C-alpha cells in the first residue's frame, strides 16, 4: 500500500493509483480540486448561501475572484503598493488522541480525534523604500491555538533567528492565539498548564512551533508590493458579557462607551495587490468557547471556522495543494476576556456545539466581508514596533495610573478561589468554588495569608487566595512572572500585544492610554490579546474587586492593569518620539527538562484476523445530500505521525478517469474519530456529512495511518472503502 504523503507530488486532488477506466480521457487542464472548489464557492456565494446576504456574497466573490474592490483603483500605473506584504499559512495541528485538551482545565477532556485542522497564518508587512526594497518590518501571526506560551515564543524566535539572522525578532514579531478551547495542550514549560496533559508533549509543541515558523517563512517569501486598507463595523449577536456584575462596577465613562456591556467593534485590515484582495486580518472580541468541554475532537472553534469559510468555502483554497491560497484570512482576538459566544450564558453541549461554532464563525465572517463594500482608509506611514519584558511580580505603579492618587505595587502571583470555579457561563471548573464570595477561602486569606504577608494583602485583597502560586514558583516553574508587552504600528493602526485575556473595560483603558500618548484616534488602537506569552486575565481594579472568574484569574493583583497601562504608555511614548527602549529581563529558558509523564505509544496491532487499513464497517451503497457517510477502519494510533501538512483521510469522487479529493480532515464536513480496541488495536471512524452542493456521482473514503511495531519506526498504510453513490 502506498504512503499517502507521497501523493503530494501528484496533481492536487488526484490519486495516481486509482483504478482508471482503460479508455479514460485525460484530466482536463485546470480541473484541480482548487478550481472545482472555486467554481462551487462562486456559485454558492452568488446564491447567497455561502453565509452572506446576496449583495455581500457578491462583494466577497468579486474580491476573491480578483476583481477590483471599492478600495482599489488607487495604485499607480505599475501596480506598485505603499508596502511590501507577504502572506503565509501552515498546519499547526498537534496530537489528536490521548492528549489533554487545553482551555477548560478538565482532566477528563482527552482528545479522541480531529474535526478540523489548526493553522498558523502569518503576515509580514514592511516599509517600501524608494528603490522598492524592504525597510522596517513587522510579522503578525495568528494561530488556531489555545494560548501562546513563553515556550513557543522562545522556540519560534530562535528558529527565525537561525533562518533569517535577526530579521524577525522579539520586537517586531507578534504571535497571537485565537484561544480555541478545543486544541491539544501540553506545549508549555510551566507546570500549571500541563496538569491535564500528564506533562509536556513534545510532538504537539513541535507542531505548533514548526507551523508558526513555516507560516512566517512563507510570508517572507511572498513579499510583494501591496496596499493596506483599514475599515470598521459593528457586530452584535456574536458575544455577550459573561461577567456583567463585575463590568457594572466600572465608572460611568466605561459603561457609556459600552452601553450593551459588549465590544461590538469589528476591524478589518485588508491586503490588496493591483486591486485584488489577497489577505485580511479581522479583530473581534469573543471567546473561542463555542465548542463545549464535553467535545473530544480537536477543533479551531468559531474563529477558525470563520477563516476556513472565507479561504476555502468562499475563495476555494486547497490546503493540500502547493502554494499559498489566493486569499489568506485570519480572525484574531482582541479584548475578549469577558466576552462569551454563548448568548444564553449557558455552557454549550455536544454535538449541538458544532452548529453553534459554525453559526458564530459565519457571523464574524459576514461582519468582516461586509466591510469590503466600503473603501476603508488607505494606510500609509510605515511600520514600527517596541517590546519590553516586565517582571509583573514586582512593578511600582505611579499615581498617574492607579486611579487613587497613590503609588502601589504588584506582588507575586496568586490564584483566586474564583478562578478555580471557572467561568460558569462557558464551562465551570472545580466543584466547591464560586464566582464572587468563597467564605472558607475568604476567611483563610484574610485571617492567615494577608496577616502573614502584608505585601500580598496590599496587592491582592480582596482576592480569596486559593493557591499562592508565586511561592510554588520558587520550587518549580508553575506560571510565568516575566512577560512581554509589545506595541506594533502599521500606518495609523496600533496593536498592543498583551499576553493574556483582557476584559473590554481593561482594553478600553489600555487603548485610551496608547491613543493619548501617540495622538492616535481611539478606534485606530486595538488590544491584540493572547500575544507572545500567557499570564491569564487582566481586569480593571473595579472588576477585580468583584472577584468573579476574571478577577480571580488576574494573577498579579488589583494593580496589574495599571502596571500594564504604565508599560504601554512608555512603549507608546518611545515609539512616538522615535526612541529605543531596553528590552528588560528576559524570561528564563525552561526547555532543558520539561516534565513529561504521558506513556509512549509502544505497539500497534490490528484486530485478530485483520490487517491495518481493513474496513470494519463499510458505507451504505448510496446517500443523498445532507446524510452522513460513516466508515470504520482497522487503524493505528494517530500520534505515530501527526500528518501535519497532510491528512488522515480523504473523501474522493471518481471523475474523468481518476479519483479526485473533495474533502480531507481539515474540512468542516468530515470528522476523524479514534478509539482503542483492546490493548494494542485501534478503530478509526471517518464520517462525512454530504454537503448540499455535492456533485452526484461515485465516491469512496480513504484512511491513511501509521502503525508502530514493537521495534523500529512507524510504517504507513492506507485503507479504502467500497464505492458508494451520492444523489442530489
Image (cartoon, grey):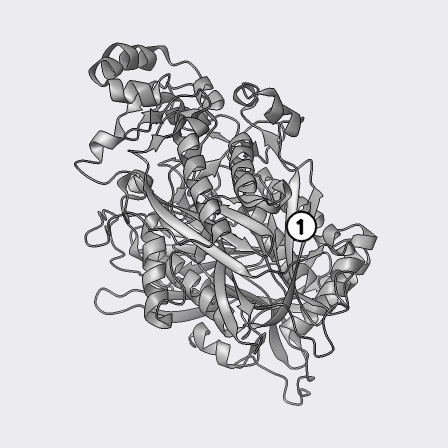
Extreme-bottom residue of the structure: 23
* Residue 553 higher or lower than 152, as above or below: above
In the orientation shown, which residue stands out farthest toward the front? 577
Q: Residue 52: x, y in percent?
A: 76, 51
In the displayed structure, 101 sits above or below 537; it is below
Q: Quadrant of the C terminus?
A: bottom right
Q: Nearer the viewer, residue 718 or 359?
A: 359
Residue at (49, 41) in percent of width and height: 295
Question: Which residue lies under the disc numbered 1?
Answer: 365
Q: Would you identify the image quadrant in which residue 169 lies?
A: bottom left
Q: What SS does tag 1 mark? A: helix
**Count of numbered marks:** 1
Q: Foreground: 315 or 252?
A: 252
* Structural crowding at the residue carrying mark 1, measured as other residues with C-alpha within 10 Å and reported as few (<14), some (14–19) or many (≥20): many
Q: Nearer the viewer, residue 605 or 250?
A: 250
Quarter of image, res 339: top right
Residue 491 seen in the figure: yes
Residue 435: tell me if it is visible: no
Q: Position of residue 33 (x, y in %)?
A: 63, 72
Give the residue at x 64% y 29%. Answer: 257
Where in the figure is residue 1, as x and y percent of width and height?
A: 42, 76
Q: Position of residue 391 (x, y in %)?
A: 30, 39
Q: Is residue 535 above or below residue 595?
A: above
Lateral position of residue 685 relative to residue 46, left or right: left
* Residue positioned 48% across, 70% down in the render: 220
Amino acid at each position: 500500500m502506498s504512503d499517502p504523503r507521497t501523493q503530494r507530488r501528484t496533481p492536487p486532488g488526484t490519486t495516481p493509483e486509482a483504478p482508471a477506466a482503460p479508455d479514460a480521457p485525460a484530466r482536463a487542464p485546470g480541473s484541480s480540486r482548487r478550481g472545482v472548489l472555486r467554481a462551487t464557492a462562486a456559485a454558492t456565494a452568488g446564491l447567497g448561501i455561502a453565509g452572506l446576504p446576496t449583495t455581500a456574497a457578491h462583494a466577497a466573490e468579486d474580491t476573491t475572484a480578483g476583481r477590483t474592490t471599492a478600495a482599489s483603483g488607487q495604485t499607480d500605473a505599475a501596480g506598485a503598493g505603499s508596502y511590501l506584504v507577504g502572506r503565509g499559512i501552515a498546519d499547526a495541528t498537534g496530537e489528536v488522541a490521548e492528549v489533554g485538551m487545553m482551555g477548560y482545565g478538565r482532566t477528563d477532556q482527552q482528545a479522541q480525534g480531529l474535526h478540523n485542522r489548526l493553522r498558523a497564518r502569518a503576515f509580514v508587512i514592511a516599509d517600501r523604500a524608494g528603490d522598492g526594497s524592504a525597510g522596517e518590518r513587522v510579522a503578525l501571526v495568528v494561530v488556531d491555538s489555545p494560548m501562546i506560551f513563553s515556550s513557543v515564543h522562545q522556540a519560534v524566535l530562535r528558529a527565525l533567528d537561525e533562518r533569517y539572522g535577526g530579521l524577525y525578532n522579539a520586537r517586531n514579531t507578534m504571535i497571537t492565539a485565537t484561544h480555541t478551547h478545543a486544541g491539544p495542550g501540553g506545549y508549555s514549560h510551566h507546570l500549571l498548564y500541563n496538569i491535564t496533559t500528564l506533562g509536556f508533549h513534545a510532538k504537539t509543541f513541535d507542531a505548533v512551533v514548526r507551523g508558526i515558523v513555516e507560516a512566517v517563512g512563507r510570508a517572507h517569501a511572498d513579499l510583494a508590493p501591496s496596499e493596506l486598507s483599514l475599515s470598521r463595523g459593528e457586530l452584535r449577536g456574536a458575544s455577550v458579557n459573561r461577567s456583567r456584575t463585575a463590568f457594572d462596577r466600572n465608572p460611568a465613562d466605561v459603561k457609556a462607551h459600552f452601553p450593551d456591556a459588549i465590544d461590538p467593534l469589528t476591524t478589518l485590515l485588508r491586503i490588496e495587490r493591483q486591486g485584488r484582495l489577497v489577505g485580511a486580518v479581522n479583530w473581534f472580541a469573543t471567546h473561542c468557547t463555542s465548542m463545549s468541554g464535553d467535545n473530544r475532537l480537536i477543533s479551531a472553534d468559531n474563529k477558525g471556522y470563520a477563516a476556513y469559510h472565507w479561504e476555502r468555502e468562499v475563495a476555494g483554497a486547497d490546503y493540500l495543494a502547493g502554494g499559498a491560497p489566493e486569499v489568506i484570512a485570519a480572525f484574531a482576538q482582541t479584548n475578549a476576556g469577558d466576552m462569551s459566544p454563548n448568548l444564553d450564558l449557558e455552557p454549550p453541549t455536544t454535538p449541538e456545539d458544532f452548529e453553534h461554532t459554525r453559526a458564530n464563525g459565519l457571523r464574524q465572517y459576514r461582519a468582516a466581508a461586509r466591510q469590503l463594500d466600503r473603501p476603508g482608509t488607505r494606510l500609509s506611514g510605515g511600520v514600527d514596533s517596541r517590546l519590553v519584558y516586565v517582571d509583573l511580580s514586582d512593578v511600582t505603579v505611579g499615581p498617574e495610573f492607579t486611579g487613587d492618587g497613590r503609588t502601589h505595587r504588584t506582588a507575586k502571583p496568586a490564584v483566586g478561589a474564583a478562578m478555580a470555579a471557572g467561568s460558569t457561563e462557558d464551562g465551570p471548573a472545580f466543584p466547591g468554588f464560586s464566582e464572587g464570595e468563597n467564605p472558607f477561602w475568604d476567611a483563610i486569606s484574610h485571617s492567615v495569608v494577608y496577616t502573614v504577608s502584608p505585601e500580598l494583602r496590599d496587592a491582592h485583597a480582596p482576592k480569596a487566595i486559593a493557591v499562592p502560586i508565586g511561592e510554588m514558583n520558587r520550587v518549580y516553574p508553575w506560571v510565568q512572572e516575566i512577560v512581554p508587552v509589545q506595541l506594533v504600528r502599521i500606518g495609523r493602526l496600533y496593536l498592543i500585544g498583551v499576553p493574556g485575556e483582557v476584559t473590554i473595560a481593561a482594553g478600553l483603558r489600555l487603548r485610551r492610554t496608547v491613543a493619548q500618548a501617540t495622538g492616535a484616534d481611539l478606534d485606530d488602537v486595538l488590544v491584540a490579546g493572547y500575544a507572545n506569552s500567557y499570564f491569564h486575565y487582566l481586569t480593571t481594579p473595579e472588576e477585580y474587586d468583584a472577584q468573579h472568574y476574571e478577577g480571580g484569574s488576574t494573577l498579579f493583583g488589583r494593580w496589574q492593569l495599571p502596571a500594564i497601562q504604565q508599560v504601554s504608555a512608555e512603549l507608546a511614548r518611545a515609539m512616538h518620539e522615535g526612541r529605543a527602549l531596553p528590552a528588560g529581563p528576559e524570561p528564563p529558558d525552561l526547555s532543558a527538562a520539561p516534565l513529561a509523564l504521558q506513556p509512549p505509544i509502544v505497539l500497534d496491532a490490528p484486530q485478530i484476523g485483520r490487517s491495518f487499513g481493513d474496513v470494519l464497517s463499510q458505507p451504505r451503497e448510496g446517500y443523498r445530500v445532507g446524510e452522513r457517510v460513516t466508515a470504520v477502519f482497522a487503524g493505528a494510533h494517530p500520534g505515530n505521525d501527526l500528518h501535519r501538512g497532510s491528512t488522515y483521510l480523504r473523501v474522493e469522487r471518481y471523475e474523468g478517469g481518476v479519483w479526485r479529493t473533495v474533502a480531507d480532515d481539515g474540512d468542516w464536513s468530515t470528522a476523524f474519530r479514534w478509539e482503542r480496541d483492546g490493548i494494542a488495536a485501534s478503530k478509526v471512524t471517518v464520517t462525512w456529512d454530504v454537503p448540499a452542493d455535492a456533485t452526484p456521482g461515485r465516491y469512496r473514503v480513504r484512511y491513511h495511518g501509521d502503525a508502530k511495531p514493537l521495534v523500529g519506526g512507524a510504517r504507513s498504510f492506507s485503507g479504502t472503502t467500497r464505492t458508494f453513490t451520492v444523489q442530489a
